[in-house]
Image (cartoon, rainbow, N blue to C red):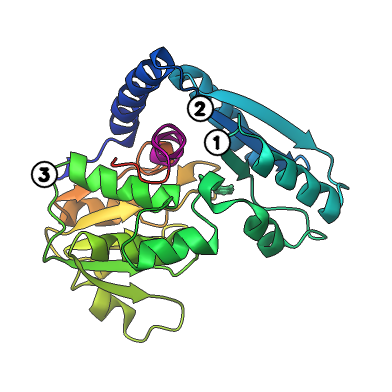
Amino acid sequence: MYQLIDGKKISGEIKDELREKAAQMKARGVERCLAVIQVGSDPASGVYVRNKKKACEYIGIRSLSYELPEETGQEQLLDLIRELNQRSDVNGILVQLPLPGHIDEEKILLAIAPEKDVDGFHPVNVGNLSIGRPGYVSCTPAGVIQLLKRSGIKIEGRECVVLGRSNIVGKPMAMLLLRENGTVTVCHSRTRNLKDITRRADILVAAVGKPKFVNGDFVKEGAVVIDVGIHRDGEGKLCGDVDFDSVAPKVSAITPVPGGVGPMTIAMLMANCVEGADGTQ
Ligand code: GUN
């Protein structure tokens, strides 16, 4: 029988710890404030932004909300970021992605002051992670590490395979597993003999962005499988990158979708906001 890794429960525990910490900080006169910027009205982004604001409220972080119209110009957005960079009462800035096509995403992310980049997307923070210096870490992969640690799953010395090489998940995931002394392999769309590699994994992290891509043939008996994907299947039901029914009977532990990695992303964003760039979560 496999262990079902309960991201909802673990994220709840983290948020409660942060709430306590934020209250103690407030008692010392330190208040955190997150500025959340959304451009346009993409419905999925709208849900994420609402959930982020709700989490701030729960934990006791002040949030500023900027809901800008789709036609907002790049310079206008840059001006807002520059203003927020300067404000001493704002310690976190988050620009919800994706941005409308006429805005250069990279330019925007580069404009956010690294010390306020609670998403961990700025090259300074990415670089710090890669050379083992303190800095903000991308929330989803940071959440995966917390899921593993808080479920009693050892990373050190184990074969870790990351499926996917995105800047937001795959690459920082590999860096974090390496920081935890895992032996790390990154696979992607050009990888040959993919299943031969994924079947070596003690810990397999699926972040390919394809619904139910990973089936039982990809995993060895007793592996730990973490599913970062979130999609809707043909019947409109939520599913991940992993075909749960096919994989679960083979594994020692697995995350569900929904209720696995998803809730951890916001919990880690809150951790970044409360604890700052050198947080010890
Ligand atoms: N869009 C999807 N995921 C994320 C995220 O983690 N941060 C931001 N800013 N936008 C996203």
Mark 1 or mark 3: name the one nearer the start of the chain: 3
Query: Which kind of residue does numbered mark 1 sit on?
Result: Asn
In the current view of this chain or complex, which residue is farthest to the bottom? 192
Q: Which residue is mark 2?
A: 32
Disc 2 crowd, CA 10 A, few/some/many (<14, 14-19, 20+): many
Residues under labels 1 and 3: Cα distance?
Answer: 45 Å
Q: Is residue 146 visible?
A: yes
Query: Which kind of residue does numbered mark 2 sit on?
Result: Arg
Which residue occupies 16% across, 59% down?
223
Q: Identify the magenta region.
A: 264-276
Which residue occupies 33% across, 79% down?
194
Left or right? Give the position of 61 relative to 171.
right
- Residue 61, position in %: x, y? 51, 23
Q: Which residue is mark 1?
A: 91
Disc 3 crowd, CA 10 A, few/some/many (<14, 14-19, 20+): few
Q: Disc 2, disc 1: CB below 8 Å? A: yes
Q: Secondary structure at mark 3?
A: loop
Query: Mark on residue 1?
Result: 3
Q: Secondary structure at mark 2?
A: loop
Quadrant in which residue 278 is drawn: top left
Judging depth in this view, the residue of 160 and 223 nearest the camera is 160
